[in-house]
Amino acid sequence: MLLALAAEKGQAWVANAITEEYLRQGGGELSLVPGKDWNNQQNIYHRWLKGETKAQREKIQKLIPAVLAILPRELRHRLCIFDTLERRALLAAQEALSTAIDAHDDAVQAVYRKAHFSGGGSPGDSVVVH
């Protein structure tokens, strides 16, 4: 996931975002320092993410809460821990709401067009939609 995010935003941006969030959440064990973008990037992407040693894996595990917090919604929802029945129901409701809002806006636009452009009223008339 970190590599996918880096492909979109760049390793330096991701490392900086992870560092800030890690520290904001109270982390302090890892050698991550705000403003030290190069060092943070080297630690996260070129040392710890390799996961070749137990210490590297432990460091990445400590970053997981910060990583989850900075992931954009479109990437975060692909993770299995977020793929719950409740989340799917909420996404379906969100889609239905979006469709309903679009239908509402189309209806308002149709009423406006009818009143102002089809001879349904004089130019000075106003349209009130409730």
Image (cartoon, rainbow, N blue to C red):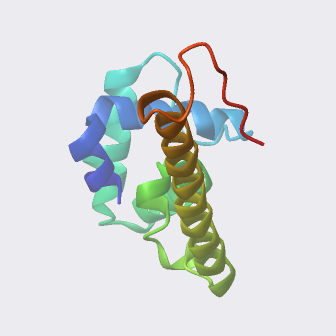
Write down the quadrant of residue 39 in the picture.
top left
Residue 109 vertical placement versus 123 (above, below): below
- Residue 67 place in picture, x, y as percent: 51, 51
Q: Is residue 102 left or right of residue 87?
A: left
- Residue 106 place in picture, x, y as percent: 49, 49
Q: Residue furthest bottom?
A: 85
Q: Answer yes or no: is residue 18 visible.
A: no
Q: Residue at x 66, y 29 (%)?
A: 127
- Choose between 67 and 79: the one closer to the eye: 79
- Choose between 61 and 66: the one closer to the eye: 66
Q: Quadrant of the C terminus?
A: top right
- Residue 50 place in picture, x, y as percent: 28, 59
Q: Residue at x 35, y 60 (%)?
A: 1
- Choose between 100 and 6: the one closer to the eye: 100
Q: Residue at x 58, y 43 (%)?
A: 108
Q: Residue furthest right?
A: 130
- Residue 10 place in picture, x, y as percent: 26, 35
Write down the quadrant of residue 95 in the picture.
bottom right
Q: Is residue 91 left or right of residue 75?
A: right
Residue 113 vertical placement versus 33 (above, below): below
Write down the quadrant of residue 44 in the picture.
top left
Q: How many marks?
A: 0
Q: Answer yes or no: is residue 90 visible.
A: yes
Q: Residue at x 42, y 19 (%)?
A: 36
Residue 88 vertical placement versus 35 (above, below): below
